Structures are given as structure tokens and as C-alpha cells.
Amino acid sequence: MPDPYDPSPSAGDRFTFGLWTVGNPGADPFGSQVRPSVPPPDLVAGLAKAGAWGVNLHDNDLVPFGTPAAEQERILAEFQKALADHGLVVPMATTNLFSHPIFRDGAFTASNPEVRAFALQKAMRSIEMGVQLGAGTIVFWGGREGVETDAARDCRDALGWYRECMNFLCAWTKNQGWDLKFALEAKPNEPRGDMYLATTGHMLHFIETLDHAEMCGVNPEVAHENMPGLSMVHAVGQAMEVGKLFHIDLNAQRIGRYDQDLRFGSEDLKGAFFLVRMLEGTCGHAAYTGPLHFDAHAYRTEDVEGVWDFARGCMRSYKILAARAKAFDADTEVLDILAANHADARNIAPTLADFNSNNLATLEALELDVDALASKGHRYERLDQLAMEYLMGVRT
Ligand code: GCO
Ligand code: MN
Ligand code: MN
């Protein structure tokens, strides 16, 4: 009998990994790589075997920087053959605007307009390649958009240049006749001391200032919200509430540390549970239906076999959490506690939903028993313990 938690694209699972995630050879700032570099077509084969639905890439994950055009075509053809042979899709593509030394002071926010021009050229070539591979979403992670010292530039100038570049790329994309979504990814720090647009919340506001805000949304990452101790669930919830969750980077992270990119669910299991619950829509509201992307990598202790343990672990944990969330949200004790807290016996909520003279009069006349309301407990201790017991597997 098949294990219900094993990923299966034919059963509708849409898990994706970046080439840079399962291809991560384990180098860190203190040591060189510990695993061989695996060619992209072999990563595609491995992902298909592990049960993934798709693969994402930076331009230079596939085509090394400076590759001549003819060689690029050969690499692309070979990669496309691997995708077709193994039935994998490329839902998302992104641009490496952080590795090359030209971006040491930023890409779209570099003080030098020639660097900003090069960043735009590189992004356009990368988007062309993404379109060729069938990607519908382009992620923008500004790895070098920030400073170590604010003596370098006024952040208002940087944000203005960032906006100009995004406006340029949106207009160019439309001009090309492509229907693409741009998903902007925030991070508070690393590799820069302070990054511009540090959280998903910053990003959501910035998007509303763009010329083509409708084609731009966010790509929140668990680690990036957790590094400074923020709630990923609330970041994702805010994005979903305004229809801007265009993509997601799933991984795990301990608060306050460097970007750990750990296997999904392996830290802050409770945060992962409430995140999956929200994405799956079992607690109400529409589910997220985009790709479920893991932006994480295996421990440096692992060999190539361990990388596939890591990948399967990410997907299995998501599916296990989805099943636990579904059971939690169908539990009558859970539903009763929630119903008691949301009860509106006097039908007051509609009065608050709109300012007009009737509602104003109703509100002014409303008699509220403040002492009774203030003395009422909410039973969230019991509710949370129920969540924990589902998570710990003693209630099913
Ligand atoms: C990081 C980022 C990146 C981006 C990737 C896609 O902290 O390094 O999360 O992994 O997600 O560059 O744009
Ligand atoms: Mn990251
Ligand atoms: Mn990421």
C-alpha cells in the first residue's frame, strides 16, 4: 500500500525545489564544498524520482555567467530534454543579481547607474530564458540590495531606483506580450548588513507604489520572517488577504540566527503547522494554489544520498502537517471553542463593517456589558493543547 505522505504529482501535489537547493554542494563561509556538483539534468531526474512536481532556477544555476550564446542553447536543449523525459515543469525562474562582484554595492539599488543598467539587462535575459522554459512566475530576491553603512546613500534614493527598475521590467514584460507574475522576496539582512524592504510587510507596501502593481506580489520565506523573530503565518496571511501571495519559500529556521535554510518542518513545528493550515485553507478562506517551493538545503554532513532524504523530508512533513491540520479543523471540540469565541448572538458585526448613518446610530445606541465581556475566558489554552496533541500524534 502506498504511503499517503509520500509526494505524488499525479495525486495533485505541486512541490518544487530550486536547482540551487538540491544542488547545494555544502560549502559555507568556513569550508569548501563537501558534495560533488551535480549537473542540472541529473538533479531533474533525482527530483522526479523523489516525487517533486517542478524545478526552479536562477539564470546562472543552469547557464554559468559569461557562457557564449551557442553553448547556452545546447545547455537549454539538454535541460528541456531532461524535463520532458522526467515530466517536470519549471513554474518559476529568478535572476542571480548577487553573486557577481559587479553587484557588490547592489543591483537595482546600486548607486552607479551603469550597474543598475547591467542588472536590468541581466534580468531581461533571465526572464527570456524563464519564458522559454515555461515559467509563469519570476521571483526577485535582491540579495545585494542594502548597505553596511547608510553613509553610502540615502535609502530614499535606493528605493526610488528599485521602483524605477521594477517599473521598467514590468513595462518591458508587457511590451513583450507576456503574462507573467513577479514575486518579490524580502529578507532583513544577510548578505548585506541591512537590506532594503526587510520584511514581507515592507514589500507589500512597496508593491502598491509600482506602476503595474497588479502583476507584482510577494514570495515570503519562512527563514526570512523568523530570523528577526516575526511571524511567517502573519506575513503570509497579510499577503493572502490582499491576493498577493504569488509564490512561497518553505524552509525552517531558528529565531535570531543566520539564514539556516533547514528542511521544512524541522524547526518551529508549531509555526509550520499553522502555516500549512493557512495555505491549505482548512481553517476557512481560500487555499493557496500556487507551487509549494522549498528554498532549503541539506545539512553539510550529508552526501548526495542525504540530499534526497532532505528533499523527501520537506515534502513528507508538508503532507503530514496538512493531514494534521485537516483533522484539527474538523474536530468538534476545536469547532466548539472557535464558535463560542466568534458568536454574534446580537448580530453586531454588520454594524461595524460599514460607516453610514444607520450603523452610526446603532453603534451609538448599543449597550455593552463591559464587565461581563472583560471577565470571559477564551479557552485558548485548551485550543492550543488540542493543536499540540494533533501535532504530537496522540489525537488523530
Ligand atoms: C537567500 C534567498 C534566495 C532566494 C533565491 C531566489 O536567502 O539566499 O532565500 O535563496 O530565494 O535567490 O530568488
Ligand atoms: Mn533565504
Ligand atoms: Mn528564498
Image (cartoon, rainbow, N blue to C red):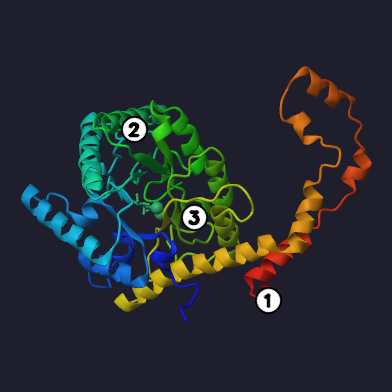
Crowd class of label 3 (few under 14; some 14 to 19; many from 20; radius 10 Å): many
Dot 3 or dot 2, earlier in sequence: 2
| Residue 129 to residue 390: above or below | above
For the residues marked 1 and 3, what is the alpha-carbon distance in whole angstroms?
A: 27 Å
Amino acid tagged 1: Val
Identified at 48% across, 40% down, the residue is: 244
Circle 1 SS class: loop
Q: Quadrant of the C terminus?
A: bottom right
Q: Position of residue 129 (x, y in %)?
A: 21, 46
Q: Quadrant of residue 351?
A: top right
Horizontally, residue 329 falls left or right of residue 213, namely right
For the residues marked 3 and 2, what is the alpha-carbon distance in whole angstroms?
A: 24 Å
Dot 1 or dot 2, earlier in sequence: 2
Q: Return the residue nearer the eye: 85 or 262.
A: 85
Horizontally, residue 326 falls left or right of residue 288, namely right
Amino acid tagged 3: Val
- Residue 129 visible in the current orientation: yes
Identified at 28% across, 63% down, the residue is: 87
Q: Quadrant of residue 181?
A: top left
Residue wearing tag 2: 166
Horizontally, residue 63 falls left or right of residue 380, namely left
Residue wearing tag 3: 222
Dot 1 or dot 3, earlier in sequence: 3
Ligand 2 within 8 Å, label 1 CB: no
Horizontally, residue 226 falls left or right of residue 367, namely left
Q: Position of residue 272 (x, y in %)?
A: 55, 61
| Residue 342 to residue 115: above or below | below
Residue wearing tag 1: 394
Q: Nearer the viewer, mark 1 or mark 2?
A: 1
Q: Position of residue 68 (x, y in %)?
A: 8, 49
Amino acid tagged 2: Met
| CB contact under 8 Å: marks 1 and 3 | no
